[in-house]
Amino acid sequence: MVVLKLATKWLYMIERRDVFQAIADPTRRMIIQRLSGGALNIGQIVDDFGITRQGIAKHLKVLHECGMVTLTQRGREQMCEARLDQLDEVADWVNESRKLWNQRFEKLDKFLADIKDSKNETTG
Amino acid sequence: MVVLKLATKWLYMIERRDVFQAIADPTRRMIIQRLSGGALNIGQIVDDFGITRQGIAKHLKVLHECGMVTLTQRGREQMCEARLDQLDEVADWVNESRKLWNQRFEKLDKFLADIKDSKNETTG
DNA sequence: CATTTGTACAACCAGATGGTTGTGCTTAAA
DNA sequence: TTTAAGCACAACCATCTGGTTGTACAAATG
């Protein structure tokens, strides 16, 4: 849980499984890229990695819980399909941070310009 | 560590602290956005959150280790500055996954077109 | 039918993670 | 010079994580 202090109140943010956590693990990132090429069953994913089927199944559970993988039963097979639209949340956060970052430089430019102006006033 | 199976060989990828792991924690994401607006010392960051200075310091250590925050001593204060260029790695991965995703639809379209062609051949 | 294939579920484990408290050391301010 | 501010480092802790093994069960296949 994250606790944020606002002006007069405290904001409690309950954590749940989210996309950022899902893509934090390199194995899960590779599973996502593998599935981006098309749906696969668990066995086909297992073949690519050096861990057990149960290990892969756990990763898929995490990805499923945050909506990055949909699971559909096909006979005795469990087909896994990537849902990349969830990645928007990540892209949005990156863009938002960059926006703030750029605004920071604008603020600095303005600050330096103000200093220059005040110098001109005193010297001129 | 991630172990990948290639055609005939095994690829061992040693894990280290990386950007994906750094932004997995919501508190760290908020620290980054807070720092995107300009450099701050640890105390100023602590004021925003409901955890101890030491807790924040640990988060900053993680961010520093993966190059997302630079630290400079200023008197007795430790100034923290965000380094957002590291986020390119995240943006690149998202874009790459989306590219594969789009190619998947192209492949499906081609597959369906081939089926249609073969039907036309047998019926025509 | 028996066997193989694909899977689910539970228990277990070592190490990482995200916090805490306590101590002590500089630097700035009174 | 005393006091307070800002911080680093270490130890500790509960929980999460990323794996493992073992068991069991349904669906194809011979």
Image: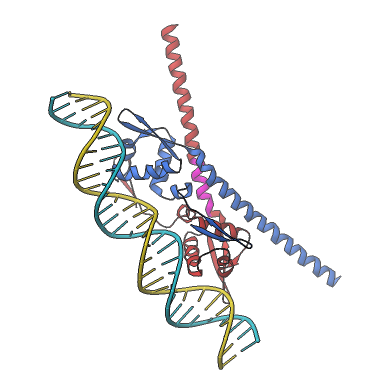
Chain colours: A red, B blue, C yellow, D cyan
Counting the numbered discs, the total is 0
Q: Left of A79 or right of it: where is A8?
A: left
Pick the front one: C2 or A23: C2
Find the residue positioned furthest to the front: B9
Magenta-tinted stretch: A86-96
- B117 vs C19: above or below: below
Q: Which residue is drawn at 30% across and 30% down?
A: B76
Residue C24 spot, x, y in % from top left = 21, 38
- D28 vs A32: above or below: below
Pick the front one: A45 or B24: A45
* Residue A9 in sight from this viewpoint: no
Pick the front one: A60 or A11: A60
- A52 vs A90: above or below: below
Most frequent secondary structure within the magenta stretch = helix
Residue B4 spot, x, y in % from top left = 56, 60
Q: Residue at x 57, y 65 (%)?
A: A45
* Residue B35 in sight from this viewpoint: yes
The answer to which quarter of the image holds residue B50 is top left
Residue A10 spot, x, y in % from top left = 30, 45
Q: Residue at x 45, y 20 (%)?
A: A112
Q: Residue at x 51, y 58 (%)?
A: B2
Pick the front one: B51 or A57: A57
Q: Left of B32 or right of it: where is B104?
A: right
Find the residue positioned furthest to the top: A124
The answer to which quarter of the image holds residue A32 is bottom right
Residue B86 spot, x, y in % from top left = 50, 41
Q: Quadrant of the image for the C terminus of chain A? A: top left
- A102 vs B96: above or below: above
Asked if the stretch drawn in magenta spans residue B16, the answer is no
